[in-house]
Amino acid sequence: MFRTIRAGWRKCHPETAARLLAFVRSRLARPGGFADRHGQPDLYYTMFGLLVAAATDMPVNLDDVEPYLQTFAPPTLDLVHLAGLTRSRLLLQHLRRSPLARLAAAAWPRQSLPPALHDAYNALAAGAPERFPHRDPWSPYSQMLRWSLAEDLGLSYVPRDLAPYRLADGMFANLAGDTAPAVNATAAALMLLNASGADRHALRPDLQRLAALQAPDGGFPATPPAPVADLLSTATASLALTCCRHPLRHSLKPFLRQTITPAGGFAAVPGDDTPDLEYTAYGLMAMGLTG
């Protein structure tokens, strides 16, 4: 995700890039994190803010950010926020490097992560369902987050069978037993299967089904019957298809142009003029996937 955000940033027109950075800077909050949609410091949004800052080389007062991150106790966090804290600490260490060292770095400096993060990750295996998205530790999204967190910690993760979430049409549902296909669940499942070495030929029908949902303007809907596309679904579907080396049917550029706001950041859907830090990261990531 970091590399695709950086690639997207490099494709920005200078005027667009300046507005975008101004928006991201405006989300800096006290006591050192980035603000959510309501202007309050938030760990989840701090991770996205640091991700954009690292990808764009935007200056951040790291001496404010580190104490803020230290206020969170890893054992108390759910999977989403533990993943956010871990990634934030990696990004903080990355940003503390010299610009030349950042450019030459092949990986995150995992060796200096606090042991408490590893302990909290191990404890999640026996954690209560409410600590996972959808209250399900084995949903495609939960397993995608677990895999991503394990990668950040330098650990391996072997996905559990995703067949209970797979529908007859090749899409995946958010929960086992659901009959409603979800684009984000499908993207998460396909990325997990691809990362675990699944036969790409066997995945081809599923990839074709996902690719067929792309509208001519480049957007993907959250579900097949959804009337409009959204940026999150567009970014995750495009990333999954790209990682699985399956071509996109249409360019993403027309859709992305509709989600850049006058304020500089990206919004969730076309026509929404309220930018959001999370969607700005996803917008840059999708830009990095454009030809």
Image (spheres, rainbow, N blue to C red):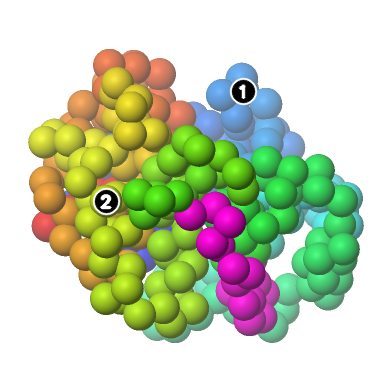
- Residue at which label 1 appears: 39
Q: Which residues are magenta?
A: 149-166
Question: Of helix, strand and loop, which one carries label 2?
Answer: helix
- Earlier in the chain: of badge 1 and badge 2, it is 1
Image quarter of the C terminus: bottom left
**Residue at horizontal 43 percent and vertical 82 percent from the top:** 197
Decide if residue 124 is on the left or right side of residue 216: right
What is the CA distance from the residue labelled 1 to the residue labelled 2?
39 Å
**Residue at horizontal 39 percent and vertical 34 percent from the top:** 222
**Amino acid on which the number 2 mark rests in the picture:** Arg
Q: Which mark, residue 167?
A: none
Question: Of helix, strand and loop, which one carries label 1?
Answer: loop
Image quarter of the N terminus: bottom left
Q: Is residue 48 above or below residue 246?
A: above
- Residue at which label 2 appears: 209
Q: Closest to the observer: 277 or 206?
A: 206
Q: Closest to the observer: 270 or 52?
A: 270
Q: Does the magenta-highlighted stretch encompass residue 288? A: no
Q: Horizontal and vertical percent for residue 44?
A: 63, 43
Q: Closest to the observer: 233 or 27?
A: 233
**Residue at horizontal 67 percent and vertical 44 percent from the top:** 133
Residues packed near mark 2 inside 10 Å, few (<14), some (14 to 19) or many (20 plus): some
Do callouts 1 and 2 mark residues in contact (Cβ within 8 Å)? no
* Quarter occupied by residue 120: bottom right
Please name the predominant secondary structure of the magenta segment in the image: loop
Does the rendering let one see residue 62? no
Q: Horizontal and vertical percent for residue 87?
A: 61, 60
Q: Give the number of callouts.
A: 2
**Amino acid on which the number 1 mark rests in the picture:** Gly
